[in-house]
Image (spheres, grey):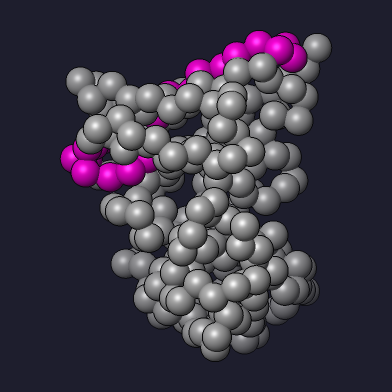
Amino acid sequence: DIQLTQSPSFLSASIGDRVTITCRASQGISSYLAWYQQKPGKAPKLLMYAASTLQSGVPSRFSGSTSGTEFTLTISSLQPEDFATYYCHQIYAYPLTFGGGTKVEIK
Amino acid sequence: QVQLVQSGAEVRKPGASVKVSCKASGYSFTAYYIHWVRQAPGQGLEWMGWINPNNGGTNYAQNFQDWVTMTRDTSIDTAYMDLRRLRSDDTAVYYCTKSRTLGLPFDVWGQGTMVSVSS
């Protein structure tokens, strides 16, 4: 199975901060990686796919990049509605797997 | 608009079965795979498998191979996930979600169905 290791698992940040979340795959997955945002009691919401393609309707302060098997989600200027848990997800091989999540909280 | 609406919360005893439904609307039901993902309380996301509503084909994660069945009824645009021999660690929120094809992400999710397993 392909393991996805997210870091950090928790981060505390202020409004306006630049935030970076990393997801490392245990083997090559090309660009078959997506990012989701989940708020408490809600279903996950697709933010980005193909590592760096923004889903329709998602603000442009979100961006994604990749370097080999390391993927990065960046929020350029954190807004109040961005406090949530973020998950990466590989859709390259079965079984499909998710990272352990990164919880972004208000400092 | 595109929606997946799931059935309500369920409570079961260990060893019982549960069947969760997922009704699609706003798009062509047979044109998208339906996946099931679960999330135990305070935990991350776990993919269970998919069903192709067009032909009923399925692909289950090995962890669930022997005790999950995914079906669909195209006459009412509804997918189902049946989980047997429930244990307490099956207590989780179960989500249905869809993808256009394999290799594409899950673009719309149901609201989730809480399944509680307790004696």
- Asked whether, in this view, residue B49 is left or right of residue A24, the answer is left
State the image coordinates of residue B40 (x, y, percent, origin top left): 70, 39
- Asked whether, in this view, residue B98 is left or right of residue A17, the answer is left
Vertical relation: B69 (above or below) A70: above
- The answer to whether any part of residue B4 appears in the image is no
Image quadrant in which the C terminus of chain A is located: bottom right
State the image coordinates of residue B100 (x, y, percent, origin top left): 29, 52
What residue is shown at x 74% (from left), y 14% (from top)?
A: B14
The furthest residue to the right: B119
Foreground residue, B6 or A78? Answer: B6
The boundaries of the magenta stretch are B12-34
Image quadrant in which the N terminus of chain A is located: bottom right
- The answer to whether any part of residue B19 appears in the image is yes
State the count of labels. 0
What residue is shown at x 37% (from left), y 46% (from top)?
A: B98
Quarter of the image holding residue B93? Answer: top right
State the image coordinates of residue A77 (x, y, percent, origin top left): 56, 84
Instruction: Answer whether residue B23 is magenta in the image.
Output: yes
Instruction: Answer whether residue B111 is magenta in the image.
Output: no
State the image coordinates of residue A28 (x, y, percent, origin top left): 54, 75
Foreground residue, B59 or A104? Answer: B59
Quarter of the image holding residue A68? Answer: bottom right
What residue is shown at x 63% (from left), y 38% (from top)?
A: B63
- Asked whether, in this view, residue B78 is left or right of residue B118, the answer is left
What residue is shown at x 69% (from left), y 70% (from top)?
A: A6
Vertical relation: B62 (above or below) A60: above
